[in-house]
Image (spheres, coloured by chain):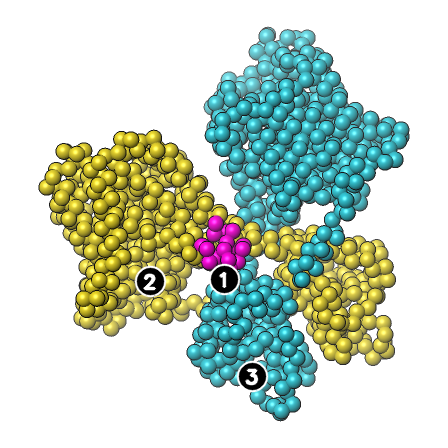
Chain colours: A cyan, B yellow
Amino acid sequence: MVDKAHSSETVATAKPNPFIEQWGWLKGYSGSIFADDLVAAIIVTILLVPQSLAYALLAGLPPQVGIYVSIFPLIAYALFGSSRVINVGPTAVISLMTAASIAVLPEGTRLISAAALALLTGGILLIAGLLKAGFIMNFVSRPVVSAYITGAALLIIFSQLKHILGVEASGNTVFGLFGDLKANAKFANIAAVLTGCAAIFILWAVRRYLAFGLVRFHVKSRIAKLIARTAPIIVIIGFIILSAALNLADTHNLRVVGTIPSGLPPFEIPNLGLGAFQSLLVPAIVIAIVAFVDSTSTAQELAARSRGRIDANKELLGLGASNLVAGVTGGYPINGSMSRSAVNFSAGGKTPLVSIIVALFMALTALFLTPILKALPLSVLAALIIVACFGLIDFKSLWRTWFYSRADGITALATFLAVLFFGVQWGVLVGVVLAMALHIKGTLQPYMPLVGRFPGTEHYRDAGRFNVETNEQVKTLRIDESLYYANARFLEDRVAQLVAESPEMTDLVLMCTAVNRIDASALSSLQEINRRLKRTDIRLHFSDMQSRVKERLYRSDFIESLSGQIYLSQHEAMEDLEPEPDWNQLSDHVDIH
Amino acid sequence: MVDKAHSSETVATAKPNPFIEQWGWLKGYSGSIFADDLVAAIIVTILLVPQSLAYALLAGLPPQVGIYVSIFPLIAYALFGSSRVINVGPTAVISLMTAASIAVLPEGTRLISAAALALLTGGILLIAGLLKAGFIMNFVSRPVVSAYITGAALLIIFSQLKHILGVEASGNTVFGLFGDLKANAKFANIAAVLTGCAAIFILWAVRRYLAFGLVRFHVKSRIAKLIARTAPIIVIIGFIILSAALNLADTHNLRVVGTIPSGLPPFEIPNLGLGAFQSLLVPAIVIAIVAFVDSTSTAQELAARSRGRIDANKELLGLGASNLVAGVTGGYPINGSMSRSAVNFSAGGKTPLVSIIVALFMALTALFLTPILKALPLSVLAALIIVACFGLIDFKSLWRTWFYSRADGITALATFLAVLFFGVQWGVLVGVVLAMALHIKGTLQPYMPLVGRFPGTEHYRDAGRFNVETNEQVKTLRIDESLYYANARFLEDRVAQLVAESPEMTDLVLMCTAVNRIDASALSSLQEINRRLKRTDIRLHFSDMQSRVKERLYRSDFIESLSGQIYLSQHEAMEDLEPEPDWNQLSDHVDIH
């Protein structure tokens, strides 16, 4: 009955009918909303075309793969996702994780393995969504997400330096990359260095000053921001023209995107052996977790601005469906992009139709625009990634976390360092496990003070802090923590110590006001305590126990063997047990069972 | 001040002066105690000689390494360890973990890598001991340990089948081993199969029936048990004679121990590059954790029988010192052996001197007895390991755990499967992380009932369960859980839901009786709730807050912005806030700050 009441409460906070809610935006769709959506879609596409090439490069895959994952997966998310403004597709962090996962495989199988990875990731997300596992979002605290993204951004910048230098370098950690870069720096290509550095400077200046400058020329702030966000396409077109005009690829050996096969993505199920799928399973699980946490954080952030809410379980389904589609259309794992979703939101995109329009535009790009991109230098794409990552680095919040709470600070720092030195796939895991461990460490040695009565009241307080009445025969320990496997032994020790100190004790009351749970290990510790106290003729009682906890105890055989009683309140326990008052008047304690 | 009081309490439960305690047994040492110790040492040695060879075989190392780690490391533990009866040295589980850790390295470097692994493990344990990290023992629940040992025992049995069949097989999981065994079974060596199966049967029968049979012949039960425990040496000597007499190694191609170099272990620091040490770091951490948990569980079990206590931090130092010594004397990681410690205990060993005498006997073995062991078949050593593992398998307790508590059952099952299918190094990690995650999952959606007053009393109870008085203007939510990062958002949702349901509400009281902790994430959620409630003209109050929690809140700036008050008790809050009674009489609520 309790659990039922509790769970119905939980359900009440969820949405009544997700399917109707999902398609709610179709009702009342109008021409003016379509105009908003179309503008947003154009701006998102302008951002997405160069990003799709760049992130495919980051993932170690041919450029067209980035375009492929920007078509059908977007439609899948529009149909199944829960956020109205999220734009899914290739993103920096997931691209880097893909690179790390397939780097160990033979060169020839990487393309198909990336698709298999997307298929697995999608399957895991879908299953998690069907199992309503959205709650795992709660395991990842904000400091962990923020430290993870900062670490990943730094690592991504590091991984792109090779394109700026025009040399080879591999490795999935700062160590590995640094070694290669140091060894190969002497072979740096002058054209790559010049175009790369120029692109970084121009893109950074555009990002930093263009909106500000436009506002000074009386452009509206919102419009100025959108122009600044999409201006990179002009910069990139400029570099394409420069590269093509000077034929830098041949004259200066500059690496460029090269011929991209035009056409729509192929539909095929990646045909890998069972063994290969098995070896991709753990990377896929980690990618699924990060993709989910990252997208959902972004979606929640944007939903909060428009007072909306995100259903984490629906988000799992949406991401799962779009990754599955990415897997069967020659793609690689994707998730919600923070930068493009933010642009969509501020450009006024209202409905999931934006994603469908963007998908159409990207299909047109795949069919007709790829020849234009041929001369685009890789160094310029790397510059685009690097400048995008500047915006993700947030040391200030790491610093603030450290001063606010040491435990959160340690967790964030460990996450950050794990990303840099063990690789991007370890960061979130390290952070989540450390956060859990530090929380549990805080409960290992619960505060268990002796309590006594505030003179003249029915209030019982910590005898070490307040001037209260205690007595030598009947002692009360208040347990300020749930009892479970990690602190059960500590309780045994604390009681043993109290018994050793209290030769006159005849009754021990455990005041359980703050005990929210007693698990199986703790129950066997209580049985052990009861047995030992019986031997020394001390009765064991409980008071102020929460009804739910009491009900669970009654389901075991512990109550039958208990030497004392379970009192509704501490005051009743003391009225009944304390020797001083007139005993005849005090036998009427309430027992609700 | 609180923290100080709390920590001094913790220190009080530790021992007053560990150094004096450590050497306490020397005071009052007598001839009769020495007689007991000598007998115990002889019996432990008889058990240890074949075990040391067998476990070295299991670890994939030459047989003499098993003897080496049974000499100086035992002396080190006697000097620094905390248990009086623990016998350290080679053990099955740690040997298997060593095998898994060094299997990936080139054949020629395995010996030195094993020594380096012991050095690293020892260093980690020592540092953990100096940092007083013994508390991590509490993270490992009994069901995890028990499932881990059962899984490891099965995996060890599986790994020894190759010696019983006389074929090659490698792999660190059931999958890997099974594939190899299946492929090679057709090359099985008849002599290996016959000696191996015969040895398994005889050793099993001796273990199962000898003590029982001796008791029927009026041998004292304790003596009968000791004879049964040491009888395997007779079986092994029998097989050595059989193997030598028939010259099975040459005539039937039976694999035998072969020539063991005689002499004491070499003293040398394993000279590996920094890179190799780095690659052994993670395995060493996992081995250190398992060695510590396993030894300490055994030590606690035995200490409880003689009403002693184990100091987990001292245990870390003892194990650390003995692993360091193992590392510089050509050994590999070791820990406390359950079987030999139990034999030591039941043979009446009283002091750490037993270990020193055993070390002397083992040194004599290394110097003079190795030629005798030459003809010992590997199949018989494998039989010894397999029969020892029979005793470690405990499905009954797995089964019991499953029925007692589903969460513990899932954790135990996952641990068991992780050992078998991912390898022995993953089991404890999976178990520990899953136990933490399930505990935390139980706190994600705290029970937060509306409460009301029991008519005519000062008691406030769950309005959904009891017939209590509530009112529409002043509502009280009781929070039955500590507030921290994982459930902070749920609190926000619960309050938002209550506000939506309660149009007349002017005051919300959060009754914090069971809130033992409020972390940084939860504090920012409370700030958010306070801010939102202000906008809708609802004041936020707290009642029954624990002093420690209150003190932490006062350290932040939350209290200044709080729209309501913090009341000492729920009754005072209601007396002050409820609209019905005469307002003039109720302004004297106690505020202790």
Kind of element beneath mark 1? helix
The residue at 78%/72% (across/down) is: B469
Q: Amino acid at mark 2?
A: Ser
**Looking at the picture, how far across and down is residue B240, in whole percent?**
15, 45
Q: Amino acid at mark 1?
A: Ser
Label 1 in the same subunit as label 3: yes
* Residue for badge 1: A521
Mark linked to residue A471: 3
Q: Are marks 1 and 3 in contact (CB under 8 Å)?
A: no
Q: In the picture shown, does residue A517 fall above or below B524?
A: below
The segment highlighted magenta reads B398-413
Q: CA distance from mark 1 to mark 3?
A: 31 Å
**Looking at the picture, how far across and down is residue A346, in whole percent?**
80, 34
- Of callouts 1 and 3, which one flags the residue occurring earlier in the amino acid sequence? 3
Chain for numbered disc 2: B
Kind of element beneath mark 2? loop
Quarter of the view holding residue A468: bottom right
Q: Is residue B21 visible?
A: yes
**Looking at the picture, how far across and down is residue A410, in whole percent?**
56, 49
Kind of element beneath mark 3? loop
